[in-house]
Amino acid sequence: MMPEKNENQYQPRELSNGHHRTDEESLLTMEEEEEAKRKKKMKWTIGIIAFIIFQVVQGLFFVLVIMKFKSPKFRVADFTIPTLTTETQTSPSFNMSFVAPIRVKNTNWGPFKYGASNMTFTYGGVQVGQVNIPKGKANFKSTKKINLDVTLSTPDLPTSISSNLGNELSSQVITLSSQGELKGKITVMFMFKKTKISQMNCNMTINTSTKAVQFLSCK
C-alpha cells in the first residue's frame, strides 16, 4: 500500500519563499525612499546654492552699478546765430544773440538735482557774456534739455587780443570758449545721496558767413 502524501510537506518552504520575497520588496521600497530623499535633499541644496549665488550677483550689481555715482555731463550743443554783427575797421568787435541749447546728461540710477548757476563765454580769456542757469533736475538715465537766451559783445579788448580778433574776422571766424559748473545731489532709492559737481569747458568756432557753429569740442 502506497504511503499517503503529506499535503503540508511543502507548505513551510512556500511560506519561507513568500517571506523572502516580502523582505526583498521591503528592502527595495526602503532604497527607493532613500533615493527619493537623496534627490529631494540635492534639489534643496542646489536651490540654496543658486539663491546664494543670485544674492551675491545682485549685491555686486547693486554696489558696482547702482551705487556707482558719476558726475553728469554738462555740455552745450550746436546752435545757429540769427543775430550777428561784426566790425573790422577801426576797432575789431562783434555782437551776437542766440539760443544756447544746454544739455545735462545723467547716466546715474537716480535723479540729479542741481542748484542755480551760471555759464560764461570768453574770447581770448576775456569774458564777453554770461547767462544764468536756473535750478533743475535731470532724471535718472536721461538728458535734461535747457534753452538759454545768450547775448555776447566784446568790451575794450587788450591790443594783442583785439589784433587777433581782427585777423579772425578777416577769415570769417570767431573762436569762443564757454565755462560753467553745476553742483547738486544724486539720490538713489530715495535714501542714498551723493554730492556731485558737473563742469563745462567747451571751445567753439563760429562761422560769421553761415552764422553757425563750425567747430565744437567739450571736455
Image (spheres, rainbow, N blue to C red):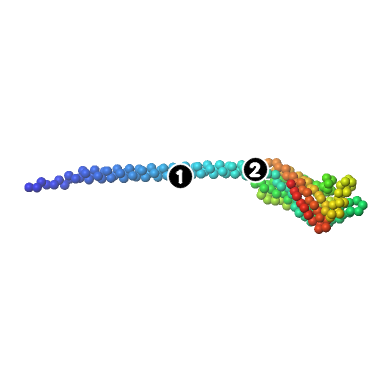
The three-letter code of the residue at mark 2 reads: Lys
The residue indicated by pointer 2 is 68
Q: Residues within 10 Å of mark 1 (few under 14, many from 20)?
A: few
Please state the horizontal and vertical placement of residue 184, each as a whole percent of the image: 72, 43
- Callout 1: SS: helix
Pointers 2 and 1 in contact (CB under 8 A)?
A: no
Residue 190 seen in render: no
The three-letter code of the residue at mark 1 reads: Lys
Q: Viewed as shown, does residue 23 lie left or right of 147?
A: left
Q: Earlier in the sequence, mark 2 or mark 1?
A: 1
Q: Residues within 10 Å of mark 2 (few under 14, many from 20)?
A: few
- Rounded to the nearest angstrom, the CA distance separating label 2 from label 1 is 36 Å
Vertical placement of residue 181 versus 99, above or below = above
Determine the residue positioned at 29% across, 43% down: 23
The residue indicated by pointer 1 is 43
Residue at the extreme right: 90
Quarter of the view holding residue 212: bottom right
Determine the residue positioned at 83% across, 48% down: 123
Determine the residue positioned at 39% across, 44% down: 35
Quarter of the view holding residue 55: top right
201 or 23, nearer to the observer: 201
106 or 123, nearer to the observer: 123
Please state the horizontal and vertical placement of residue 192, each as a whole percent of the image: 65, 41
Q: Viewed as shown, does residue 53 lie left or right of 14?
A: right
